[in-house]
Image (tube, grey):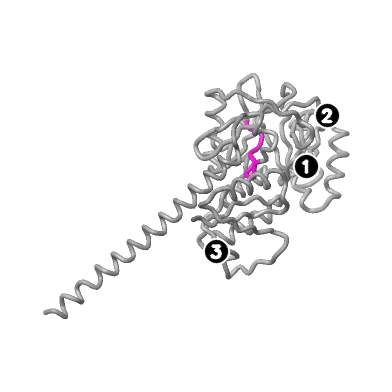
Amino acid sequence: MFRVGFLYSRLRVEEKLLLKELESRSNIEVVRINDGKEFFDISRLPAEVDVLLERSISHSRGLYVSRLFEAHGVPVVNPSSVAEKCGDKYITSQILQSAGISTPKVFMAFDSKTALEATDAMGYPCVLKPVVGSWGRLLAKVDSHDMAEAVIEHKASLGVNHKVFYVQEYINKPGRDIRAFVIGNEVIGAIYRSSENWITNTARGGVATNCPLTPKLEQISKQTARVLGGGLLAVDLFETEDGFTVNEVNHTMEFRNSIETTGVNIPAKIVDYVVEEAKREKLKKRITRDNLQLRRAAQSQPQIRHMQS
């Protein structure tokens, strides 16, 4: 029997599907943990579980609660190190760029004046994004110097978190992008997200259709997942004349529109992976315990022989 902690903010379609899959398995006991309904004593493990599945909507809540469980020896899917890399667009872009994986050019600025200089240097159109966020919120495609000036002024008025200016090259995609689902070392499926709008997120009205897996798509998706730490990841890519380029990576993947589209039971694949992580952790703890017992037995042997002599 495995005790699986289920960390969530609210029960969206994805969380309901995952809970249904978890609770359908006789070898799993689910412990629900709502990240907004309780406080956490950092000196204590919040719940006795073998593994934690992190499904918080809030990046910061998921990150901190994951670290709390990890500090007490409980593995988290995905680990906080992966959430940190994927949840901040600058960190994601920097890792991809450093690894030689194709990704749009990015300029960073921390002042309104230099942000405007960055958009001018990038050229128009370009894209302004918050470094933390999802669902295509607060994205702006700016087509001119005057438009960039207005958007930057607005963002600067929103508070300190919006004074980190992430300026991204605009990729002229063919009315769609691709989301590839990677679990462990396997790309389990992919979808096209199509829209007449330049933002193609399904949360913003994009239409999902099946995307055939090709060797090149699988290769770049696996490589991306590997450099970011692996686990359960959704890799968002653009198609260009030179091949695929990675836009973003999501560590708490949404998949409600992708199960029928791909023909893959994504909740079952996720739960299978979580169970394997729990098995690995139990095996590791058993090996550690057995090795400790062997060392103690070996240390006691000289004392026994001395007493017999």
The mark found on residue 306 in the picture is: none
Q: What's the CA distance linking mark 2 and mark 1?
A: 18 Å
Residue 7 in magenta stretch:
no
Classify residue 54 as left or right of residue 302.
right
Give the position of the C terminus as an image quadrant. bottom left
- Residue pointed to by mark 1: 114
Q: Are marks 3 and 2 in contact (CB under 8 Å)?
A: no
- The image quarter containing residue 200 is top right
Q: Which residue is mark 2?
A: 143
Instruction: Check disc 3 and give the amino acid type.
Output: Glu
User: Which numbered mark, 2 or 1, is in the foreground of this view?
Assistant: 2
Where disc 2 sits, the SS reads loop
Does residue 284 appear anywhere in the picture? yes
Prevailing secondary structure of the magenta residues: strand
In percent of width and height, residue 259 lies at 64, 34
Report which residue position mark 3 lands on: 48
Q: CA distance from mark 3 to mark 2?
A: 53 Å
